[in-house]
Protein backbone atom coordinates (compact mmCIF):
# COMPACT_ATOMS: atom_id res chain seq x y z
CA UNK A 1 0.00 0.00 0.00
CA UNK A 2 1.35 3.42 -1.01
CA UNK A 3 1.21 5.95 1.84
CA UNK A 4 3.03 8.69 -0.08
CA UNK A 5 1.14 11.91 -0.70
CA UNK A 6 0.49 12.97 -4.29
CA UNK A 7 2.11 16.04 -5.82
CA UNK A 8 -1.20 17.93 -5.56
CA UNK A 9 -1.52 17.06 -1.88
CA UNK A 10 2.04 18.18 -1.18
CA UNK A 11 1.38 21.44 -3.02
CA UNK A 12 -1.73 21.95 -0.91
CA UNK A 13 0.28 21.32 2.27
CA UNK A 14 2.95 23.77 1.16
CA UNK A 15 0.43 26.49 0.32
CA UNK A 16 -1.36 26.20 3.68
CA UNK A 17 1.92 26.05 5.62
CA UNK A 18 3.21 29.20 3.90
CA UNK A 19 -0.02 31.03 4.72
CA UNK A 20 0.14 29.95 8.37
CA UNK A 21 3.81 30.96 8.69
CA UNK A 22 3.47 34.31 6.92
CA UNK A 23 -0.19 35.30 7.27
CA UNK A 24 -1.23 33.93 10.67
CA UNK A 25 1.58 34.51 13.13
CA UNK A 26 1.16 34.51 16.90
CA UNK A 27 0.62 38.28 17.08
CA UNK A 28 -2.19 38.19 14.52
CA UNK A 29 -3.79 35.32 16.39
CA UNK A 30 -3.51 37.20 19.67
CA UNK A 31 -5.24 40.17 18.04
CA UNK A 32 -8.07 37.96 16.78
CA UNK A 33 -8.53 36.51 20.26
CA UNK A 34 -8.72 40.02 21.70
CA UNK A 35 -11.42 41.03 19.21
CA UNK A 36 -13.69 38.05 19.78
CA UNK A 37 -12.00 34.88 18.54
CA UNK A 38 -13.08 34.94 14.89
CA UNK A 39 -11.94 37.05 11.97
CA UNK A 40 -13.97 37.07 8.76
CA UNK A 41 -11.01 38.35 6.75
CA UNK A 42 -8.84 35.42 7.89
CA UNK A 43 -11.67 33.03 7.00
CA UNK A 44 -11.80 34.67 3.59
CA UNK A 45 -8.08 33.99 3.16
CA UNK A 46 -8.73 30.30 3.80
CA UNK A 47 -11.39 30.49 1.09
CA UNK A 48 -8.91 32.18 -1.29
CA UNK A 49 -6.68 29.11 -0.83
CA UNK A 50 -9.63 26.94 -1.87
CA UNK A 51 -9.90 25.28 1.53
CA UNK A 52 -13.56 26.07 2.20
CA UNK A 53 -14.45 24.31 -1.05
CA UNK A 54 -12.41 21.14 -0.51
CA UNK A 55 -15.50 18.95 0.01
CA UNK A 56 -17.78 20.86 -2.37
CA UNK A 57 -18.18 19.19 -5.81
CA UNK A 58 -16.71 20.95 -8.82
CA UNK A 59 -20.21 21.25 -10.27
CA UNK A 60 -21.06 23.52 -7.34
CA UNK A 61 -17.92 25.67 -7.71
CA UNK A 62 -15.85 23.65 -5.23
CA UNK A 63 -12.57 21.76 -5.39
CA UNK A 64 -14.15 18.28 -5.36
CA UNK A 65 -11.40 16.83 -3.19
CA UNK A 66 -11.55 14.24 -0.41
CA UNK A 67 -10.61 13.27 3.15
CA UNK A 68 -6.84 13.13 2.60
CA UNK A 69 -6.77 16.71 1.30
CA UNK A 70 -8.91 17.75 4.27
CA UNK A 71 -6.47 16.02 6.61
CA UNK A 72 -3.46 17.74 5.02
CA UNK A 73 -5.08 21.17 5.38
CA UNK A 74 -6.19 20.61 8.98
CA UNK A 75 -2.72 19.43 10.03
CA UNK A 76 -1.16 22.65 8.78
CA UNK A 77 -3.86 24.82 10.37
CA UNK A 78 -3.20 22.95 13.62
CA UNK A 79 0.47 23.93 13.49
CA UNK A 80 -0.65 27.56 13.61
CA UNK A 81 -3.55 26.92 16.05
CA UNK A 82 -5.76 28.78 13.57
CA UNK A 83 -9.02 29.88 15.18
CA UNK A 84 -11.20 30.11 12.07
CA UNK A 85 -13.31 26.90 11.86
CA UNK A 86 -12.48 25.32 8.51
CA UNK A 87 -14.00 22.07 9.77
CA UNK A 88 -17.45 23.67 9.56
CA UNK A 89 -16.95 24.30 5.84
CA UNK A 90 -15.83 20.69 5.36
CA UNK A 91 -18.92 19.40 7.19
CA UNK A 92 -21.29 21.72 5.34
CA UNK A 93 -19.80 20.82 1.97
CA UNK A 94 -20.05 17.09 2.60
CA UNK A 95 -23.51 17.08 4.20
CA UNK A 96 -25.19 19.40 1.72
CA UNK A 97 -23.63 17.74 -1.33
CA UNK A 98 -24.37 14.25 -0.03
CA UNK A 99 -27.85 14.62 1.45
CA UNK A 100 -29.59 17.88 0.47
CA UNK A 101 -32.09 18.30 -2.38
CA UNK A 102 -30.85 19.97 -5.56
CA UNK A 103 -32.44 23.35 -4.85
CA UNK A 104 -30.77 23.63 -1.44
CA UNK A 105 -27.42 22.61 -2.92
CA UNK A 106 -27.67 25.27 -5.60
CA UNK A 107 -28.62 27.89 -3.02
CA UNK A 108 -25.85 27.25 -0.47
CA UNK A 109 -22.94 25.19 -1.82
CA UNK A 110 -21.36 27.89 -4.05
CA UNK A 111 -21.36 30.25 -1.07
CA UNK A 112 -19.80 27.62 1.17
CA UNK A 113 -17.08 27.01 -1.42
CA UNK A 114 -16.31 30.72 -1.86
CA UNK A 115 -16.30 31.40 1.87
CA UNK A 116 -19.13 33.91 1.55
CA UNK A 117 -21.49 31.62 3.48
CA UNK A 118 -20.36 30.16 6.79
CA UNK A 119 -22.64 27.23 7.63
CA UNK A 120 -22.13 25.77 11.12
CA UNK A 121 -23.25 22.42 12.53
CA UNK A 122 -25.55 23.07 15.51
CA UNK A 123 -26.19 19.67 17.08
CA UNK A 124 -25.10 19.66 20.72
CA UNK A 125 -27.70 19.81 23.49
CA UNK A 126 -27.17 20.00 27.25
CA UNK A 127 -28.83 16.67 28.04
CA UNK A 128 -27.17 14.73 25.26
CA UNK A 129 -23.53 14.80 26.37
CA UNK A 130 -21.90 13.25 23.28
CA UNK A 131 -24.81 11.01 22.23
CA UNK A 132 -26.09 11.84 18.78
CA UNK A 133 -29.40 10.00 19.16
CA UNK A 134 -30.55 12.31 21.97
CA UNK A 135 -32.41 15.27 20.47
CA UNK A 136 -35.12 17.45 22.03
CA UNK A 137 -35.37 20.03 19.24
CA UNK A 138 -38.54 19.61 17.18
CA UNK A 139 -39.67 20.52 13.68
CA UNK A 140 -43.23 20.72 12.42
CA UNK A 141 -44.53 20.98 8.87
CA UNK A 142 -47.49 23.04 7.78
CA UNK A 143 -48.40 23.82 4.19
CA UNK A 144 -45.12 22.47 2.89
CA UNK A 145 -43.06 24.73 5.16
CA UNK A 146 -41.05 23.65 8.22
CA UNK A 147 -40.68 25.46 11.53
CA UNK A 148 -37.99 24.42 14.01
CA UNK A 149 -37.77 24.99 17.76
CA UNK A 150 -35.01 24.10 20.20
CA UNK A 151 -31.72 25.17 21.76
CA UNK A 152 -28.26 24.09 20.60
CA UNK A 153 -25.10 24.64 22.64
CA UNK A 154 -21.45 25.33 21.84
CA UNK A 155 -22.07 26.05 18.16
CA UNK A 156 -18.77 27.04 16.55
CA UNK A 157 -18.85 30.80 15.74
CA UNK A 158 -22.60 30.46 16.14
CA UNK A 159 -23.22 34.21 16.41
CA UNK A 160 -21.19 34.83 13.24
CA UNK A 161 -22.53 32.00 11.06
CA UNK A 162 -24.78 32.63 8.08
CA UNK A 163 -26.74 29.40 8.53
CA UNK A 164 -26.93 26.27 10.67
CA UNK A 165 -27.26 22.56 10.01
CA UNK A 166 -29.63 21.44 12.76
CA UNK A 167 -30.95 17.99 13.78
CA UNK A 168 -34.53 17.98 15.07
CA UNK A 169 -37.29 15.45 15.71
CA UNK A 170 -39.90 15.39 12.95
CA UNK A 171 -42.68 12.85 12.84
CA UNK A 172 -41.06 10.61 15.46
CA UNK A 173 -37.62 10.41 13.85
CA UNK A 174 -34.56 12.63 13.70
CA UNK A 175 -34.25 14.74 10.56
CA UNK A 176 -31.66 17.28 9.47
CA UNK A 177 -32.51 20.87 8.56
CA UNK A 178 -30.81 24.03 7.35
CA UNK A 179 -31.81 27.25 9.09
CA UNK A 180 -30.57 30.67 7.96
CA UNK A 181 -29.22 32.94 10.69
CA UNK A 182 -31.39 35.77 9.38
CA UNK A 183 -34.55 33.68 9.63
CA UNK A 184 -37.13 34.88 12.12
CA UNK A 185 -37.01 33.21 15.53
CA UNK A 186 -33.21 32.67 15.58
CA UNK A 187 -31.08 34.19 18.34
CA UNK A 188 -27.45 33.47 19.24
CA UNK A 189 -25.47 34.31 22.38
CA UNK A 190 -21.74 34.25 21.63
CA UNK A 191 -18.85 33.70 24.03
CA UNK A 192 -15.13 32.94 24.03
CA UNK A 193 -13.90 29.34 24.17
CA UNK A 194 -10.94 27.95 26.09
CA UNK A 195 -8.59 28.05 23.11
CA UNK A 196 -9.38 31.69 22.33
CA UNK A 197 -11.94 30.88 19.64
CA UNK A 198 -15.65 31.59 19.59
CA UNK A 199 -18.87 29.65 20.06
CA UNK A 200 -22.51 30.41 20.83
CA UNK A 201 -25.71 28.99 22.22
CA UNK A 202 -28.35 29.25 19.49
CA UNK A 203 -32.09 29.33 20.21
CA UNK A 204 -34.67 28.54 17.53
CA UNK A 205 -38.28 29.59 18.13
CA UNK A 206 -40.48 28.38 15.28
CA UNK A 207 -37.69 29.36 12.91
CA UNK A 208 -38.30 28.72 9.20
CA UNK A 209 -36.22 25.69 8.18
CA UNK A 210 -35.33 23.78 5.00
CA UNK A 211 -35.32 20.00 5.14
CA UNK A 212 -31.99 18.44 4.20
CA UNK A 213 -32.90 14.79 4.82
CA UNK A 214 -35.35 12.74 6.86
CA UNK A 215 -32.54 10.26 7.59
CA UNK A 216 -31.10 12.76 10.01
CA UNK A 217 -29.22 10.49 12.39
CA UNK A 218 -27.19 8.85 9.62
CA UNK A 219 -26.35 12.24 8.13
CA UNK A 220 -25.46 13.65 11.55
CA UNK A 221 -23.17 10.70 12.30
CA UNK A 222 -21.41 11.32 9.00
CA UNK A 223 -21.04 15.02 9.83
CA UNK A 224 -19.61 14.30 13.27
CA UNK A 225 -17.22 11.71 11.85
CA UNK A 226 -15.87 14.37 9.50
CA UNK A 227 -15.42 16.55 12.56
CA UNK A 228 -13.58 13.79 14.42
CA UNK A 229 -11.21 13.11 11.53
CA UNK A 230 -10.54 16.83 11.15
CA UNK A 231 -9.90 17.19 14.89
CA UNK A 232 -7.46 14.26 14.76
CA UNK A 233 -5.55 15.85 11.89
CA UNK A 234 -5.56 19.26 13.54
CA UNK A 235 -4.29 17.72 16.78
CA UNK A 236 -1.36 16.12 14.92
CA UNK A 237 -0.38 19.57 13.66
CA UNK A 238 -0.74 21.08 17.13
CA UNK A 239 1.36 18.32 18.72
CA UNK A 240 3.99 18.52 15.99
CA UNK A 241 4.49 22.23 16.64
CA UNK A 242 4.29 21.76 20.42
CA UNK A 243 7.11 19.23 20.26
CA UNK A 244 9.21 21.54 18.05
CA UNK A 245 8.73 24.46 20.47
CA UNK A 246 9.68 22.25 23.40
CA UNK A 247 12.82 20.94 21.73
CA UNK A 248 13.86 24.49 20.83
CA UNK A 249 13.37 25.57 24.46
CA UNK A 250 15.42 22.64 25.79
CA UNK A 251 18.25 23.52 23.42
CA UNK A 252 18.17 27.15 24.57
CA UNK A 253 17.54 26.94 28.33
CA UNK A 254 20.69 26.40 30.36
CA UNK A 255 21.34 25.03 33.84
CA UNK A 256 24.74 24.38 35.39
CA UNK A 257 26.26 26.01 32.32
CA UNK A 258 24.85 23.56 29.76
CA UNK A 259 21.66 23.29 27.70
CA UNK A 260 19.08 21.19 29.53
CA UNK A 261 18.61 19.23 26.30
CA UNK A 262 21.78 17.40 27.30
CA UNK A 263 20.09 15.90 30.38
CA UNK A 264 19.30 12.26 29.67
CA UNK A 265 16.06 12.19 31.69
CA UNK A 266 14.64 15.09 29.68
CA UNK A 267 15.75 13.53 26.39
CA UNK A 268 13.82 10.38 27.32
CA UNK A 269 10.69 12.44 27.96
CA UNK A 270 11.03 14.12 24.57
CA UNK A 271 11.42 10.69 22.95
CA UNK A 272 8.18 9.61 24.64
CA UNK A 273 6.46 12.74 23.28
CA UNK A 274 7.68 11.89 19.78
CA UNK A 275 6.38 8.35 20.13
CA UNK A 276 2.93 9.58 21.16
CA UNK A 277 2.93 12.02 18.24
CA UNK A 278 3.68 9.28 15.73
CA UNK A 279 1.03 6.98 17.22
CA UNK A 280 -1.43 9.83 16.85
CA UNK A 281 -0.33 10.56 13.28
CA UNK A 282 -0.88 6.96 12.19
CA UNK A 283 -4.36 6.90 13.73
CA UNK A 284 -5.20 10.23 12.13
CA UNK A 285 -4.31 8.74 8.75
CA UNK A 286 -6.47 5.74 9.62
CA UNK A 287 -9.43 7.96 10.48
CA UNK A 288 -9.20 9.97 7.26
CA UNK A 289 -8.85 6.86 5.11
CA UNK A 290 -11.98 5.39 6.74
CA UNK A 291 -14.21 8.42 6.17
CA UNK A 292 -15.67 6.91 2.99
CA UNK A 293 -16.11 3.42 4.49
CA UNK A 294 -19.56 1.94 5.32
CA UNK A 295 -21.20 3.61 8.32
CA UNK A 296 -20.51 0.92 10.95
CA UNK A 297 -16.89 0.54 9.90
CA UNK A 298 -16.45 4.30 9.73
CA UNK A 299 -17.95 4.91 13.17
CA UNK A 300 -15.76 2.27 14.80
CA UNK A 301 -12.65 3.69 13.15
CA UNK A 302 -13.40 7.23 14.35
CA UNK A 303 -13.84 6.04 17.93
CA UNK A 304 -10.55 4.13 17.86
CA UNK A 305 -8.71 7.09 16.41
CA UNK A 306 -10.17 9.55 18.92
CA UNK A 307 -9.13 7.34 21.85
CA UNK A 308 -5.50 7.28 20.71
CA UNK A 309 -5.51 10.96 19.83
CA UNK A 310 -6.99 11.84 23.20
CA UNK A 311 -4.29 9.91 25.03
CA UNK A 312 -1.54 11.42 22.88
CA UNK A 313 -2.85 14.97 23.20
CA UNK A 314 -3.00 14.78 26.97
CA UNK A 315 0.51 13.31 27.21
CA UNK A 316 2.19 15.68 24.77
CA UNK A 317 0.50 18.77 26.21
CA UNK A 318 1.29 17.92 29.82
CA UNK A 319 4.89 16.97 29.09
CA UNK A 320 5.45 20.18 27.13
CA UNK A 321 4.24 22.30 30.06
CA UNK A 322 6.31 20.33 32.58
CA UNK A 323 9.47 20.53 30.48
CA UNK A 324 9.05 24.29 30.18
CA UNK A 325 8.44 24.84 33.87
CA UNK A 326 6.52 27.90 35.06
CA UNK A 327 6.79 29.76 31.75
CA UNK A 328 4.79 26.97 30.12
CA UNK A 329 1.53 28.15 31.69
CA UNK A 330 1.92 31.90 31.11
CA UNK A 331 -0.34 33.61 28.59
CA UNK A 332 2.60 35.49 27.11
CA UNK A 333 4.38 32.31 26.04
CA UNK A 334 3.11 30.43 23.00
CA UNK A 335 3.26 26.86 24.34
CA UNK A 336 0.48 27.57 26.84
CA UNK A 337 -1.86 28.28 23.92
CA UNK A 338 -0.93 25.00 22.26
CA UNK A 339 -1.63 23.22 25.54
CA UNK A 340 -5.07 24.83 25.78
CA UNK A 341 -5.85 23.86 22.19
CA UNK A 342 -4.89 20.23 22.85
CA UNK A 343 -7.05 20.21 25.97
CA UNK A 344 -10.03 21.52 24.03
CA UNK A 345 -9.53 19.14 21.10
CA UNK A 346 -9.48 16.18 23.50
CA UNK A 347 -12.99 17.22 24.63
CA UNK A 348 -14.32 17.99 21.14
CA UNK A 349 -16.59 15.59 19.22
CA UNK A 350 -16.62 13.23 22.22
CA UNK A 351 -13.90 12.95 24.84
CA UNK A 352 -11.56 10.00 25.29
CA UNK A 353 -13.74 8.23 27.86
CA UNK A 354 -16.81 8.50 25.62
CA UNK A 355 -15.00 7.04 22.63
CA UNK A 356 -13.45 4.30 24.75
CA UNK A 357 -17.03 3.28 25.50
CA UNK A 358 -17.81 3.41 21.78
CA UNK A 359 -14.86 1.15 20.98
CA UNK A 360 -15.96 -1.29 23.66
CA UNK A 361 -19.58 -1.31 22.48
CA UNK A 362 -18.56 -2.02 18.89
CA UNK A 363 -16.23 -4.92 19.70
CA UNK A 364 -17.22 -8.31 18.37
CA UNK A 365 -16.45 -11.64 20.01
CA UNK A 366 -13.08 -11.89 18.25
CA UNK A 367 -12.31 -8.17 18.87
CA UNK A 368 -10.88 -8.22 15.36
CA UNK A 369 -7.91 -10.36 16.33
CA UNK A 370 -8.82 -13.44 14.31
CA UNK A 371 -11.17 -11.86 11.78
Image (tube, rainbow, N blue to C red):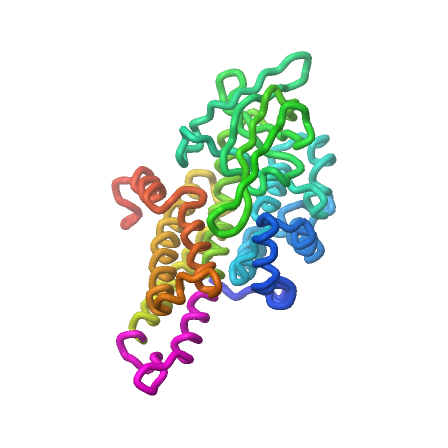
Q: Write the start and end of the magenta stretch as one range.
A: 239-266
Task: Give left or right: position of 275 versus 295.
Answer: left
Q: Residue at x 63, y 37 (%)?
A: 96
Identity of the residue drawn at 39% across and 54% down: 309
Q: Nearer the viewer, residue 94 or 22?
A: 22
The front one of 8 and 212 is: 212
**Numbered-mark total:** 0
Above or below, comparing residue 253 to residue 68 in the picture: below
Say if the magenta span includes residue 95: no
Residue at 64 percent across and 25 percent down: it is 209
Q: Is residue 12 visible?
A: no
Give the vertical position of 58 relative to 134 (above or below). Answer: below
Image spot of residue 47 (x, y percent)? 69, 52
Q: Is residue 291 above or below residue 126?
A: below
Can you name the residue that lies furthest to the top here?
Answer: 143
Q: Main secondary structure of the magenta part?
A: helix
Residue occupying image coordinates x 34% and y 59% = 315
Is residue 83 among what the camera can see?
A: yes
Q: In the picture, residue 189 is in which quadrant?
A: top right
Amino acid sequence: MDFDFSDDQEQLRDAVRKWVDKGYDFERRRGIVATGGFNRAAYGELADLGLTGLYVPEADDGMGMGPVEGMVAMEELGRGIVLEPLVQALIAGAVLSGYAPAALKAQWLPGVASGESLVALAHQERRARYRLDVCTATATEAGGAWALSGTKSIVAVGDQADAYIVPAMAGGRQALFLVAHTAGGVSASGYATQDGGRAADVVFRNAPAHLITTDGLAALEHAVDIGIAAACAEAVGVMDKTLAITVEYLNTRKQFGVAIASFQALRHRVADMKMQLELARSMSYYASLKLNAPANERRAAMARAKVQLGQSMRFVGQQAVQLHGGIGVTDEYIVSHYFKKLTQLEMSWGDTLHHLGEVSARMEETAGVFA
